Amino acid sequence: MEVQTSEQTPKSQSRRGLNFSAFEDEMLCKAWLETEKDPVVLSNQLKQAYWDRVVDTYNQLMGSLTIRTTTSLMSRWSTIQKSVGDFCGFLTQLETSQNSLTTLEWINEAKRVYHTVYGQPFKFENCWNLLKGTPKWEEYCSAKGNTKKAKSALNVDITTSGLGASSTPTTPSPTPSTPSSAPFELDVDPISLDAPCKERVIRRKVENERKNDECGQYMAKVDEANIVLKNFLSAFDARLQKSEEIALRELQLKEQKMLERKIEKEQKIMDMDLSSMPPMRRDYYLARQKEILARWTASGQFGGSNEGHSGLQSEENSGGGTV
Protein backbone atom coordinates (compact mmCIF):
# COMPACT_ATOMS: atom_id res chain seq x y z
CA MET A 1 0.00 0.00 0.00
CA GLU A 2 1.32 3.42 -0.94
CA VAL A 3 1.68 5.70 2.06
CA GLN A 4 0.02 9.10 1.68
CA THR A 5 1.64 12.11 3.28
CA SER A 6 0.60 15.71 3.42
CA GLU A 7 4.14 16.82 2.52
CA GLN A 8 5.92 14.26 0.34
CA THR A 9 7.92 16.43 -2.05
CA PRO A 10 9.17 20.03 -2.08
CA LYS A 11 6.59 20.71 -4.75
CA SER A 12 3.73 19.47 -2.58
CA GLN A 13 4.85 21.62 0.35
CA SER A 14 3.51 24.70 -1.40
CA ARG A 15 0.03 23.22 -1.50
CA ARG A 16 -2.44 22.21 1.19
CA GLY A 17 -2.38 18.60 2.31
CA LEU A 18 -5.28 16.20 2.03
CA ASN A 19 -8.40 17.18 3.94
CA PHE A 20 -8.90 15.46 7.27
CA SER A 21 -11.61 12.83 7.37
CA ALA A 22 -13.94 12.29 10.33
CA PHE A 23 -12.01 9.11 11.17
CA GLU A 24 -8.72 11.03 11.22
CA ASP A 25 -10.26 13.64 13.53
CA GLU A 26 -11.33 10.89 15.91
CA MET A 27 -7.87 9.31 15.85
CA LEU A 28 -6.31 12.71 16.57
CA CYS A 29 -8.59 13.19 19.59
CA LYS A 30 -7.74 9.70 20.84
CA ALA A 31 -4.01 10.39 20.36
CA TRP A 32 -4.32 13.65 22.29
CA LEU A 33 -6.18 11.90 25.12
CA GLU A 34 -3.72 9.01 25.31
CA THR A 35 -0.57 11.12 25.30
CA GLU A 36 0.49 12.14 28.81
CA LYS A 37 1.97 15.56 29.53
CA ASP A 38 3.27 17.40 32.56
CA PRO A 39 0.62 19.57 34.25
CA VAL A 40 2.98 22.53 34.40
CA VAL A 41 3.24 25.10 31.64
CA LEU A 42 5.69 23.74 29.10
CA SER A 43 8.35 25.59 27.18
CA ASN A 44 8.19 25.72 23.42
CA GLN A 45 10.79 22.98 23.19
CA LEU A 46 8.86 20.68 25.55
CA LYS A 47 5.62 21.46 23.76
CA GLN A 48 7.17 20.40 20.49
CA ALA A 49 8.35 17.17 22.09
CA TYR A 50 4.87 16.58 23.51
CA TRP A 51 3.27 17.04 20.11
CA ASP A 52 5.85 14.76 18.55
CA ARG A 53 4.55 12.08 20.93
CA VAL A 54 0.96 12.92 19.95
CA VAL A 55 1.90 12.52 16.30
CA ASP A 56 3.56 9.17 17.00
CA THR A 57 0.45 7.93 18.79
CA TYR A 58 -1.76 9.21 15.96
CA ASN A 59 0.31 7.49 13.28
CA GLN A 60 0.22 4.25 15.29
CA LEU A 61 -3.56 4.45 15.49
CA MET A 62 -3.86 5.22 11.78
CA GLY A 63 -1.38 2.57 10.69
CA SER A 64 -0.31 3.17 7.09
CA LEU A 65 -3.54 4.83 6.01
CA THR A 66 -2.31 8.42 6.11
CA ILE A 67 0.81 9.95 7.63
CA ARG A 68 0.43 13.49 8.95
CA THR A 69 3.16 15.91 10.01
CA THR A 70 3.37 17.52 13.42
CA THR A 71 2.50 20.94 12.02
CA SER A 72 -0.55 19.55 10.20
CA LEU A 73 -1.90 17.78 13.29
CA MET A 74 -1.25 20.77 15.55
CA SER A 75 -3.17 23.00 13.15
CA ARG A 76 -6.04 20.53 12.94
CA TRP A 77 -6.18 20.17 16.72
CA SER A 78 -6.38 23.95 17.01
CA THR A 79 -9.52 23.88 14.87
CA ILE A 80 -11.04 20.94 16.74
CA GLN A 81 -10.40 22.21 20.28
CA LYS A 82 -11.71 25.68 19.40
CA SER A 83 -14.91 24.36 17.78
CA VAL A 84 -15.58 21.70 20.44
CA GLY A 85 -14.80 24.19 23.21
CA ASP A 86 -17.28 26.70 21.79
CA PHE A 87 -19.93 23.99 21.48
CA CYS A 88 -19.32 22.88 25.08
CA GLY A 89 -19.70 26.48 26.18
CA PHE A 90 -23.02 26.94 24.43
CA LEU A 91 -24.22 23.61 25.82
CA THR A 92 -23.23 24.72 29.34
CA GLN A 93 -25.23 27.93 28.88
CA LEU A 94 -28.33 26.01 27.87
CA GLU A 95 -28.02 23.46 30.69
CA THR A 96 -27.73 26.32 33.17
CA SER A 97 -30.52 28.53 31.83
CA GLN A 98 -33.09 26.00 30.52
CA ASN A 99 -33.43 23.12 32.95
CA SER A 100 -36.72 22.02 31.41
CA LEU A 101 -35.03 20.73 28.26
CA THR A 102 -33.94 17.15 27.74
CA THR A 103 -30.34 16.21 26.97
CA LEU A 104 -31.12 15.74 23.28
CA GLU A 105 -32.90 19.09 23.18
CA TRP A 106 -29.88 20.73 24.84
CA ILE A 107 -27.56 19.28 22.20
CA ASN A 108 -29.80 20.30 19.28
CA GLU A 109 -30.24 23.80 20.70
CA ALA A 110 -26.47 24.14 21.21
CA LYS A 111 -25.97 23.18 17.56
CA ARG A 112 -28.49 25.82 16.52
CA VAL A 113 -26.77 28.49 18.63
CA TYR A 114 -23.39 27.50 17.21
CA HIS A 115 -24.73 27.81 13.66
CA THR A 116 -26.32 31.17 14.45
CA VAL A 117 -23.18 32.61 16.02
CA TYR A 118 -20.60 31.32 13.54
CA GLY A 119 -22.68 30.98 10.38
CA GLN A 120 -21.81 27.32 9.89
CA PRO A 121 -22.89 24.00 11.42
CA PHE A 122 -20.99 22.26 14.21
CA LYS A 123 -18.92 19.65 12.36
CA PHE A 124 -17.08 17.93 15.21
CA GLU A 125 -19.83 16.12 17.11
CA ASN A 126 -17.86 12.87 16.75
CA CYS A 127 -14.87 14.54 18.43
CA TRP A 128 -17.08 16.01 21.14
CA ASN A 129 -18.44 12.53 21.91
CA LEU A 130 -14.86 11.32 22.42
CA LEU A 131 -13.64 14.29 24.47
CA LYS A 132 -16.62 15.03 26.71
CA GLY A 133 -16.33 13.80 30.26
CA THR A 134 -12.71 12.70 29.94
CA PRO A 135 -10.45 13.90 32.79
CA LYS A 136 -7.86 15.35 30.43
CA TRP A 137 -10.38 17.39 28.46
CA GLU A 138 -12.09 18.61 31.62
CA GLU A 139 -8.70 19.56 33.08
CA TYR A 140 -7.80 21.32 29.86
CA CYS A 141 -11.06 23.32 29.88
CA SER A 142 -10.61 24.18 33.56
CA ALA A 143 -7.05 25.36 32.90
CA LYS A 144 -8.41 27.67 30.22
CA GLY A 145 -10.91 29.15 32.67
CA ASN A 146 -13.95 27.86 30.83
CA THR A 147 -16.13 27.60 33.93
CA LYS A 148 -16.00 31.26 34.87
CA LYS A 149 -16.18 32.37 31.26
CA ALA A 150 -19.21 30.16 30.67
CA LYS A 151 -21.10 32.06 33.38
CA SER A 152 -20.02 35.35 31.82
CA ALA A 153 -21.15 34.20 28.39
CA LEU A 154 -24.43 33.01 29.90
CA ASN A 155 -25.14 36.48 31.27
CA VAL A 156 -24.31 38.02 27.91
CA ASP A 157 -26.58 35.63 26.07
CA ILE A 158 -29.54 35.91 28.45
CA THR A 159 -29.61 39.65 29.24
CA THR A 160 -28.78 42.34 26.71
CA SER A 161 -27.74 44.67 29.52
CA GLY A 162 -24.56 42.66 29.93
CA LEU A 163 -23.43 43.25 26.35
CA GLY A 164 -21.87 46.60 27.02
CA ALA A 165 -20.25 45.54 30.28
CA SER A 166 -18.07 42.75 28.95
CA SER A 167 -14.51 42.47 30.07
CA THR A 168 -11.63 43.74 28.00
CA PRO A 169 -10.90 41.23 25.24
CA THR A 170 -7.63 39.36 25.34
CA THR A 171 -4.86 40.14 22.92
CA PRO A 172 -5.52 38.39 19.60
CA SER A 173 -3.37 35.40 18.91
CA PRO A 174 -0.65 35.80 16.28
CA THR A 175 -1.36 34.97 12.68
CA PRO A 176 -1.03 31.36 11.56
CA SER A 177 2.22 32.17 9.76
CA THR A 178 4.10 32.84 13.02
CA PRO A 179 5.68 30.06 15.09
CA SER A 180 3.76 31.07 18.21
CA SER A 181 0.49 30.18 16.54
CA ALA A 182 0.91 26.53 17.43
CA PRO A 183 -2.41 25.01 18.56
CA PHE A 184 -1.15 24.22 22.05
CA GLU A 185 -0.37 27.89 22.65
CA LEU A 186 -3.67 29.07 21.25
CA ASP A 187 -5.34 30.75 24.22
CA VAL A 188 -8.86 31.04 22.88
CA ASP A 189 -11.85 31.54 25.09
CA PRO A 190 -14.13 28.83 23.71
CA ILE A 191 -17.40 30.28 24.95
CA SER A 192 -16.84 33.98 25.58
CA LEU A 193 -18.48 36.29 23.08
CA ASP A 194 -16.37 39.06 21.56
CA ALA A 195 -17.93 42.15 19.96
CA PRO A 196 -18.77 40.52 16.60
CA CYS A 197 -20.29 37.55 18.41
CA LYS A 198 -22.35 39.87 20.60
CA GLU A 199 -23.67 41.53 17.49
CA ARG A 200 -24.62 38.12 16.18
CA VAL A 201 -26.39 37.36 19.45
CA ILE A 202 -28.35 40.60 19.15
CA ARG A 203 -29.23 39.79 15.55
CA ARG A 204 -30.29 36.35 16.68
CA LYS A 205 -32.60 37.85 19.32
CA VAL A 206 -34.06 40.21 16.71
CA GLU A 207 -34.52 37.28 14.36
CA ASN A 208 -36.24 35.28 17.11
CA GLU A 209 -38.57 38.20 17.81
CA ARG A 210 -39.35 38.42 14.10
CA LYS A 211 -40.07 34.70 14.01
CA ASN A 212 -42.30 35.07 17.09
CA ASP A 213 -44.21 37.85 15.33
CA GLU A 214 -44.58 35.69 12.25
CA CYS A 215 -45.73 32.82 14.45
CA GLY A 216 -48.29 35.10 16.09
CA GLN A 217 -49.57 36.23 12.71
CA TYR A 218 -49.74 32.64 11.56
CA MET A 219 -51.71 31.61 14.65
CA ALA A 220 -54.08 34.55 14.10
CA LYS A 221 -54.68 33.34 10.55
CA VAL A 222 -55.23 29.82 11.87
CA ASP A 223 -57.80 31.12 14.38
CA GLU A 224 -59.52 33.08 11.61
CA ALA A 225 -59.57 30.00 9.40
CA ASN A 226 -61.04 27.98 12.28
CA ILE A 227 -63.83 30.54 12.68
CA VAL A 228 -64.59 30.41 8.96
CA LEU A 229 -64.58 26.62 9.07
CA LYS A 230 -66.86 26.61 12.13
CA ASN A 231 -69.34 28.93 10.39
CA PHE A 232 -69.21 26.80 7.27
CA LEU A 233 -69.89 23.63 9.24
CA SER A 234 -72.79 25.30 11.07
CA ALA A 235 -74.33 26.42 7.78
CA PHE A 236 -73.72 22.97 6.32
CA ASP A 237 -75.43 21.31 9.30
CA ALA A 238 -78.39 23.67 8.91
CA ARG A 239 -78.70 22.89 5.21
CA LEU A 240 -78.36 19.18 5.92
CA GLN A 241 -81.08 19.31 8.57
CA LYS A 242 -83.35 21.22 6.20
CA SER A 243 -82.69 18.69 3.44
CA GLU A 244 -83.55 15.85 5.81
CA GLU A 245 -86.81 17.56 6.78
CA ILE A 246 -87.72 18.05 3.12
CA ALA A 247 -86.89 14.43 2.35
CA LEU A 248 -89.02 13.29 5.30
CA ARG A 249 -91.99 15.37 4.14
CA GLU A 250 -91.64 14.02 0.61
CA LEU A 251 -91.57 10.48 1.97
CA GLN A 252 -94.67 11.13 4.06
CA LEU A 253 -96.49 12.59 1.04
CA LYS A 254 -95.47 9.60 -1.05
CA GLU A 255 -96.74 7.19 1.58
CA GLN A 256 -99.96 9.18 1.87
CA LYS A 257 -100.54 9.01 -1.88
CA MET A 258 -99.83 5.29 -1.90
CA LEU A 259 -102.33 4.82 0.92
CA GLU A 260 -104.94 6.88 -0.90
CA ARG A 261 -104.46 4.85 -4.09
CA LYS A 262 -104.79 1.63 -2.08
CA ILE A 263 -107.97 2.83 -0.40
CA GLU A 264 -109.30 3.92 -3.78
CA LYS A 265 -108.69 0.46 -5.24
CA GLU A 266 -110.24 -1.22 -2.22
CA GLN A 267 -113.24 1.10 -2.45
CA LYS A 268 -113.78 0.06 -6.04
CA ILE A 269 -113.73 -3.57 -4.98
CA MET A 270 -116.24 -2.88 -2.21
CA ASP A 271 -118.55 -1.04 -4.66
CA MET A 272 -118.59 -3.87 -7.19
CA ASP A 273 -121.92 -5.60 -7.96
CA LEU A 274 -121.29 -9.30 -7.50
CA SER A 275 -124.78 -10.52 -8.49
CA SER A 276 -124.09 -10.50 -12.23
CA MET A 277 -120.59 -12.07 -12.02
CA PRO A 278 -119.73 -15.67 -12.84
CA PRO A 279 -119.52 -17.86 -9.74
CA MET A 280 -115.72 -18.15 -9.55
CA ARG A 281 -115.17 -14.46 -10.09
CA ARG A 282 -117.93 -13.61 -7.66
CA ASP A 283 -116.40 -15.86 -5.01
CA TYR A 284 -112.97 -14.17 -5.49
CA TYR A 285 -114.28 -10.64 -5.08
CA LEU A 286 -116.54 -11.69 -2.25
CA ALA A 287 -113.48 -12.96 -0.37
CA ARG A 288 -111.66 -9.71 -1.15
CA GLN A 289 -114.56 -7.66 0.13
CA LYS A 290 -114.62 -9.64 3.36
CA GLU A 291 -110.86 -9.15 3.77
CA ILE A 292 -111.10 -5.41 3.12
CA LEU A 293 -114.09 -5.05 5.41
CA ALA A 294 -112.28 -6.84 8.24
CA ARG A 295 -109.21 -4.63 7.85
CA TRP A 296 -111.26 -1.44 7.72
CA THR A 297 -113.19 -2.50 10.80
CA ALA A 298 -109.99 -3.29 12.73
CA SER A 299 -108.33 0.01 11.76
CA GLY A 300 -111.39 2.12 12.47
CA GLN A 301 -111.75 3.36 8.90
CA PHE A 302 -114.84 1.42 7.96
CA GLY A 303 -116.12 2.75 4.66
CA GLY A 304 -117.48 1.81 1.34
CA SER A 305 -120.77 2.48 -0.41
CA ASN A 306 -124.04 1.14 0.87
CA GLU A 307 -124.43 -0.59 -2.42
CA GLY A 308 -121.25 -2.60 -2.06
CA HIS A 309 -122.04 -3.39 1.53
CA SER A 310 -125.59 -4.37 0.65
CA GLY A 311 -124.25 -6.55 -2.17
CA LEU A 312 -121.93 -8.26 0.29
CA GLN A 313 -124.77 -8.87 2.74
CA SER A 314 -127.14 -10.03 0.03
CA GLU A 315 -124.56 -12.52 -1.19
CA GLU A 316 -124.04 -13.78 2.34
CA ASN A 317 -127.78 -14.08 2.91
CA SER A 318 -128.30 -15.94 -0.35
CA GLY A 319 -125.36 -18.21 0.31
CA GLY A 320 -123.91 -17.51 -3.14
CA GLY A 321 -120.57 -16.54 -1.65
CA THR A 322 -119.77 -20.01 -0.36
CA VAL A 323 -117.10 -21.90 -2.17
Image (tube, helix red, strand yellow):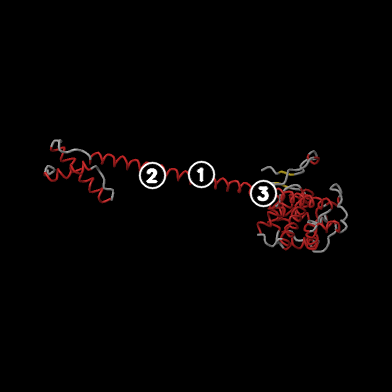
Q: Residues within 10 Å of mark 1 (few under 14, many from 20)?
A: few
Q: Which residue is mark 3?
A: 220
Nearest to N terminus: mark 2 or mark 3: 3
What SS does tag 3 mark?
Answer: helix
Up/down of 224 relative to 85, above or below: above
- Please name the amino acid that badge 1 sits on: Arg
Residue at image location 54% in from the left, 45% down from the top: 235
Q: In which quadrant of the rendered image does the C terminus lie?
A: top left
Q: Nearer the viewer, mark 3 or mark 1?
A: 1
> Going 48% across and 45% down the picture, which residue do you hit?
242
Between the C-alphas of marks 2 and 1, the distance is 20 Å
- Percent x, y of residue 150: 78, 60
Furthest-front residue in view? 306
Q: Quadrant of residue 1?
A: top right
Element type at mark 2: helix
Residue at mark 2: 252
Tell me how far mark 3 sits from mark 1, CA to CA. 29 Å
Residue 20, percent from left and from top: 72, 46
Q: Which residue is the site of mark 1?
A: 239
Label 3 sits on what residue type? Ala
Direction from residue 303 to residue 320 in the image, left or right: left
Q: Position of residue 183 (x, y in %)?
A: 80, 53
How many other residues sit within 10 Å of disc 2, few (<14), some (14-19) or many (≥20)? Answer: few
Viewer-proximal residue among 316 and 111: 316
Residue under the image location 76 percent in, 47 percent down = 119
The three-letter amino acid code for the residue at tag 2 is Gln
| Numbered label tally | 3
In the picture, measured across the screen, residue 265 lies left or right of residue 139, that is left
Answer few, some or many: residues within 10 Å of disc 3's Cα (few below 14, many 20 plus, some between 14 and 19): few
First along the sequence among labels 3 and 1: 3
Which of the two discs, 2 and 3, sits closer to the camera? Answer: 2
Q: Quadrant of residue 256?
A: top left
